[in-house]
Amino acid sequence: MIDDQQLTAAGNEISDSFVAAQRQSNNTLAALQANPQWYTMLTGDRPTGRLHLGHYFGSIRERVAMQNLGVNTNIIIADYQVITDRDTTEHIEDNVLNLVLDYLAAGIDPEKTMIFTHSAVPAENQLMLPFLSLVTEAELHRNPTVKSEMEASGHALTGLLLTYPVHQACDILFCKANVVPIGKDNLPHVEITRTIARRFNERYAAKHPVFPEPAAILSDAPEIPGLDGRKMSKSYGNSIMLGATAEQTAKLIKKSPTDSQRRITFDPINRPQISALLTTAGLVTSRDPQEIAQEIGDAGAGALKSYVITEVNRFLEPHRERRAELAKDMDVVRDILHDGNARANAIANQTLDEVRDAMGMRY
Ligand code: TRP
């Protein structure tokens, strides 16, 4: 958890609203840890590729921890979100099944955590209609994440890209989640979800509110850099995939760029590439990157890379073994998803009935 002092220090550089969100998130997390049984968590991933180490430390690990604390945990594989900013669903089935494999290998227990996809839960999607009536076009256009995704896509703004934050509200509210672990780019989506829940309750359900106003929990992992010091991204080829082989991982780390200074120091601003290697090593060993830097010292980048290769592969070996074992029987993996979809449908049908009741639409 990022503590208050660090936040105040950071406050000069990052926006006040982010500091407020981080504080709020810390409070929510503390409350959840004290009384996990009061919480329903929903979060998810877009099935656009494989999960990497950044996903593991940024979110998967926390999901497993919440599940094991006794929080009611739910993971959506957001397949309709794939087509918000791209015009193909190529490889989608493969991506979905591989997400399930990584979740299971990482310790998600399908008996405890519901895993499901958008496209299999019609009643969840139907919430979109009343929810869209609760937001204005101007509010949709103000969403900074939508704006930057539109710019990055290089395409015209589609109806789905403009409205997917409302669809994300459907994901969160159909199962009445009250906590939503996310990265900071998803904060505006949780904000609109709170607005929609509040407006729905005010307009249609003042006496017996249907929806909670969910709180965001921001990932507390440091922004995990890719091996080249840039953001970890599939398109940069700088990420360590959870499901890659030890050899592929070694090759990727070996060819990662470094700089010409021999002595290893941890200096994320001036030496982003060396520091990315140190951060990675620190995460997988639970050690302080500074300490690793000192230990390697004048042995240079080659020695640092050998250390990172050994430790990353050591860390990922059990995950990879479980993953390979599970992958031997993909029918079981499909069954797990079908079961999650069936449970999600039951919950979504129930919630949609409550919505119909509140709106006087039960004929
Ligand atoms: N937008 C999220 C992402 O890009 C994925 C997502 C879809 C999600 N639906 C959600 C996250 C609901 C939290 C809650 O990572």
Image: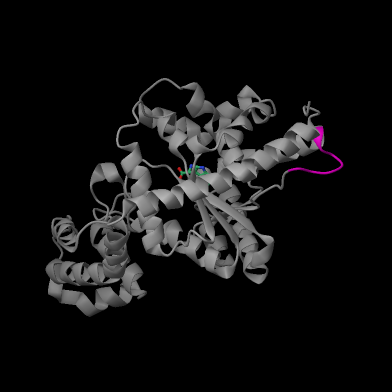
**Residue 350 drawn at (x, y percent):** 69, 42
Q: Can residue 64 be spotted in the picture?
A: yes
Callout count: 0
Q: Is residue 359 above or below residue 223?
A: above
Give the residue furthest to the bottom.
295
Q: State the residue lying farthest toward the right.
A: 207
Name the residue nearer the viewer: 149 or 341: 341
| Towards the viewer: 294 or 54 | 54
Q: Is residue 44 visible?
A: no
Residue 60 vs residue 95: left or right? right
The question of residue 205 being in magenta is answered with yes
Q: Say above or below: 233 vs 72.
A: above
Q: Residue at x 23, y 79 (%)?
A: 295
Task: Confirm whether the magenta stretch covers residue 222.
Answer: no
The quadrant where residue 152 appears: top left
Image point (72%, 44%), residue name: 211
Give the residue at the far top of this rendering: 156
Residue 185 location (% of width, % of height): 49, 44
Question: According to the image, what is the colour scheme of the structure?
Answer: one colour
The picture quadrant where one finds residue 89 is top left
Magenta region, residue range: 204-210
Q: Height in image: 123 above or below 258? A: above
User: On the picture, is 72 further left or further right than 277?
Assistant: right
Q: Residue drawn at (51%, 35%), measured in percent from left and top?
A: 144
Q: Tell whether 83 sits left or right of 341.
A: left
Provide residue 8's location: percent of width, then percent of height. 57, 61
> What x and y, as percent, mark residue 205?
81, 38
Instruction: Give the overall secondary structure of the magenta segment.
Output: loop
- Placement of the C terminus among the 4 image quadrants: top right
